[in-house]
Structure formats: structure tokens, C-alpha cells
Image (cartoon, grey):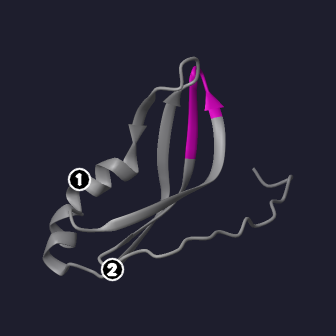
Amino acid sequence: LQDLLIKTLPDIIGFQEVRSTRAAPDGVRTRHQVSDLAKILPGYQYVFEPAMMFEQGDELHQEGLAIFSRYPILKTDFLKLSRDPHDS
């Protein structure tokens, strides 16, 4: 993926199911995929918006969308969609 992104240099890149993980007791971030992506995409600005949160063991997970742009991100907003409680 990194080689393709460096070769093509897209103006805007959208990622879904991007995860951020924190250790629940102290809140220390143990993994943040957006930071990993930012390291391989220098010069891009980004915004991350969690779409869902869940606990697994002693960790709190957030998963959502990340948008990277070679142009300045001047404003962000999000719209939460309704959820079907019977959908698992």
C-alpha cells in the first residue's frame, strides 16, 4: 500500500475501519493506525472520526474513518447515521 501511495501521490485518500486502541485503566494509547498512516504519508493533513467504540478485555477500541489530503483541511464536520439495534 505504501509503495502505491508514494508512486501515485493521490490528492485525497479515504480509509475506513481505521482503529485506535487505548488501555482502559489509564487511557494510554497503545495503537493508533492514523499515526501509522501519517508516517508513511508525510505532507498530508488528516482528520479521523470514530464511528464506533467498544471494549475488549482491558482495552477501549475506536474504529472509524480517516481522510488524508495534500491540500489544507479547512473545516471538518460529521453526520452520525442511525443504527439498527438488531444488526450485529
Main secondary structure type of the part rendered in magenta: strand
- CB atoms of marks 2 and 1 within 8 Å: no
Amino acid type of the residue that numbered disc 1 sits on in the rendered structure = Lys
Q: Does residue 78 sit above or below 54 in this rendering?
A: below
| Secondary structure of the residue carrying numbered label 1 | helix
| Identity of the residue furthest to the right in this view | 85
Question: Which numbered dot is residue 39?
Answer: 1
Question: Which numbered dot is residue 71?
Answer: 2
Amino acid type of the residue that numbered disc 2 sits on in the rendered structure = Tyr
Report the side of 35 relative to 53 (left or right): left
Question: Which numbered dot is residue 15?
Answer: none
Which is closer to the viewer, label 2 or label 1? 2
**Magenta-drawn segment:** 55-62
CA–CA distance between discs 2 and 1? 17 Å
Residue plotted at (57% across, 20% down): 58
Image quarter of residue 29: top left
| Secondary structure of the residue carrying numbered label 2 | loop
Category of crowding for the residue at label 1, using alpha-carbon neighbours closer than 10 angstroms: few (below 14), some (14–19), many (at least 20): few
Residue plotted at (52% across, 74% down): 75
21 vs 48, nearest the viewer: 48
Q: Residue 9, how many percent across, how many down?
A: 20, 78
Q: Does residue 20 sit above or below 73 in this rendering?
A: above
Residue plotted at (46% across, 63% down): 47
Category of crowding for the residue at label 2, using alpha-carbon neighbours closer than 10 angstroms: few (below 14), some (14–19), many (at least 20): few
Q: Residue 11, how many percent across, how many down?
A: 30, 82
